[in-house]
Amino acid sequence: MNYRHAYHAGNHADVLKHAVLARLIEHMKKKDKPFRVVDAHAGVGVYDLSGIEAGKTGEWEGGIGKLAETFAPDVEALLAPYRAVIAALNPGGALRHYPGSPELALRLMRPQDRLIANELHPQDAVALERQYLHDPRCDVTSMDAETCLKARLPPPERRGLILVDPPYELKTEAEKTVRMLVQGVRRFLQGVFVVWYPLKADATAETVLTGIRDIGLPATLKVELRVREAFSAGGLAGSGLAILNAPWKLDEELRLLVPALAQRLGIGRWGEAQVAWINKPV
Ligand code: SAM
């Protein structure tokens, strides 16, 4: 396992993922009934943008670093929960600490909601455990994501948001992601599943999206943000999220939010957004 999220925290892909994740948690909170977030690839929780790893790539400067200026009020209203978490982590105002998915979830969740934060990398799992040791709402585990979903789905609350956010380091990871989703949906049909995928000059996105379409769940939405053209050996040109069992009206929110983010984060003439149904709601 070579991937460490500390090198990439706060980049354009994180901005898309976390802005959408924050919207999803807001939707979950519309009902009083508790819900559970299962974060199968959690990372360490909080990232220091002034640290050695973030400094080596400077990726955050092309992501959260470009969000200092505000957007139009309707876009800001949708970004508000995400911005509030970042502001709470940086009380002095200057941007230094960036929230990963478990931090974002815990800060937006209510006392009755629960988080399972799972991370396989031994060092990152220790850091994650240390970070959330004292939060009774959070259970940290360290196992393979596929095992985690098998063990933890369905959640006892029968309401849940499942984040599948692998690094796609291995050639087999796109197929594994689809397999995890097939098994996850079989166990927890009503769960809201969120899957991150990279947009690169390879077949990863296509493999993931074809697999997800074939699962056949209605209300499966895809949202993509490209910051530049993809070329071979050119790395990450953008990213996408597939949302299975997408909450009602999430598509309308994202049709407003994601183009604004794409315009801001795009490099040069680039900056493309796409929000489309993979399978429409019934
Ligand atoms: N979800 C995090 C966030 O948004 O802040 C970022 C996660 S990062 C993209 C992917 C994480 O998955 C890494 O921390 C990596 O160590 C972990 N990982 C890699 N393979 C895994 C596996 N098979 N099971 C669980 N975690 C894994």
Image (cartoon, rainbow, N blue to C red):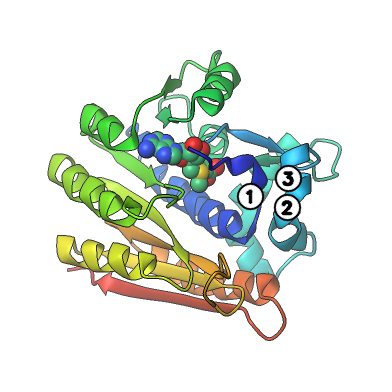
Quick check: 119 left or right of 73?
left
Residue to which mark 2 is pinned: 57
Q: Residues within 10 Å of mark 3 (few under 14, many from 20)?
A: many
Q: Which residue lies furthest to the left in this view?
A: 186
Label 2 neighbourhood size at 10 Å, few (<14), some (14-19), many (20+)? some
Q: How far apart are marks 1 and 3 (CA)?
A: 7 Å
The percent coordinates of residue 34 (x first, y second) are: 34, 31
Q: Which of marks 1 and 3 is nearer the N terminus?
A: 1
Q: Do the residues labelled 1 and 2 touch (CB within 8 Å)?
A: yes
Q: Classify 10 Å Cα crowding around label 1: few (below 14), some (14-19), many (20 and above).
A: many
Which label's residue is closer to the chain start, 1 or 2? 1
**Can see residue 42?**
no
121 versus 133 height, above or below: below
Asked if marks 2 and 3 touch (Cβ < 8 Å), the reply is: yes
Report the residue at 37% width, 64% height from top.
Answer: 204
Inspect the image, locate mark 2, and give the three-letter code of the amino acid beneath it.
Thr
Q: Does the residue labelled 1 lie within 8 Å of ligand 1?
A: yes
Camera sees residue 254: yes
Residue depicted at 19% across the width and 64% down the height: 218
Is 7 on the left or on the right of 26, as rendered?
right
Q: Is mark 3 within 8 Å of ligand 1?
A: no
Instruction: Provide residue 89's location: percent of width, then percent of height.
Output: 72, 35
Q: Quadrant of residue 53?
A: top right
Residue depicted at x 26% and y 29%? 152
Q: In what element is the residue under mark 2?
A: helix
Q: Which mark is residue 8?
A: 1
What's the residue type where badge 3 is placed? Ala
1 vs 2, front mark: 2
Is 255 placed above or below 63 here?
A: below
The Cα–Cα distance between marks 2 and 3, rounded to whole angstroms, is 6 Å
